[in-house]
Image: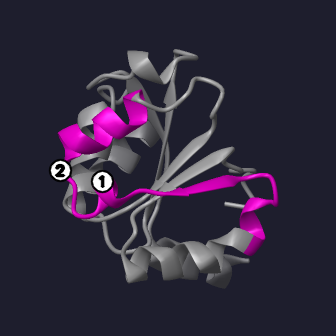
Amino acid sequence: MRRKGYRPALVLCSTSKRTRETLELLLPHLGSSARIDYDRALYLAEWPRLLGEIRATPADASPLMLVGHNPGLEQLALALSLQPQSSAERARAESLVEKFPTAALAVLDFETSDWRDVKPGSGRLIDYVRPKDLAARIEDE
């Protein structure tokens, strides 16, 4: 996240112990300006509920990061993603469909500046990273 410049302005995090611990590991790399909101509604939420939480987010809280649980996060990423336009987008989408493991990161970009306008099929999957991808990238460097 740091290398690619992914620095959220707001992080919505489930209140579970595991998600809080995961976020604690990330915080030193996110920058000090990220506001953290722990939200019980994210705990094991299904994707429509997660989408509702996104849509309730103030427009100025961008970029936004969600730290939560599967299968809801995986289903949300799939639901929000547009049909892939390029071979790189197709590859990312295929990896996402294959598996969304613990600590995976899906990065979506939206054409809107208001979270209320986010709806299924409105986002581009611009990045998708699984823990095993990080290990391969480190070996290549």
Residue at the location (63% across, 34% down)? Answer: 61
Count of numbered circles on the image:
2
Q: Quadrant of the C terminus?
A: bottom right
Q: Is-magenta flag for residue 39?
A: yes
What percent of the width, then of the height, locates residue 50? 30, 44
Name the front one of labels 2 and 1: 1
What percent of the width, then of the height, locates residue 7? 71, 50
Q: Is residue 134 left or right of residue 97?
A: right
Q: Quadrant of the N terminus?
A: bottom right
Which residues fall within the magenta stretch?
28-55
Residue at the location (80% across, 60% down)? Answer: 31
The answer to whether residue 24 is seen in the rendering is: yes
The numbered mark at residue 81 is: none
Q: Looking at the image, which is closer to me, 14 or 107?
A: 14
Residue at the location (40% across, 69% down)? Answer: 15
Q: Residue furthest right?
A: 32
Residue holding disc 1: 41
What percent of the width, then of the height, locates residue 121? 29, 24
Residue at the location (30% across, 64% down)? Answer: 100
Q: Is residue 140 above or below residue 12?
A: below
> Of helix, strand and loop, which one carries label 2?
loop
Amino acid under label 2? Glu
Residue holding disc 2: 46
The answer to whether residue 86 is seen in the rendering is: no
> Of helix, strand and loop, which one carries label 1?
helix
User: Whole-Å distance between the Cαs marked 2 and 1?
Assistant: 10 Å
Q: Are there few (<14), some (14-19), or many (20+) residues within 10 Å of tag 2?
A: some
Amino acid under label 1? Ala
Q: Is residue 124 left or right of residue 77?
A: right
Q: Looking at the image, which is closer to me, 40 or 69?
A: 40
Q: Is-magenta flag for residue 17?
A: no
Name which of mark 2 and mark 1 comes first in the sequence: 1
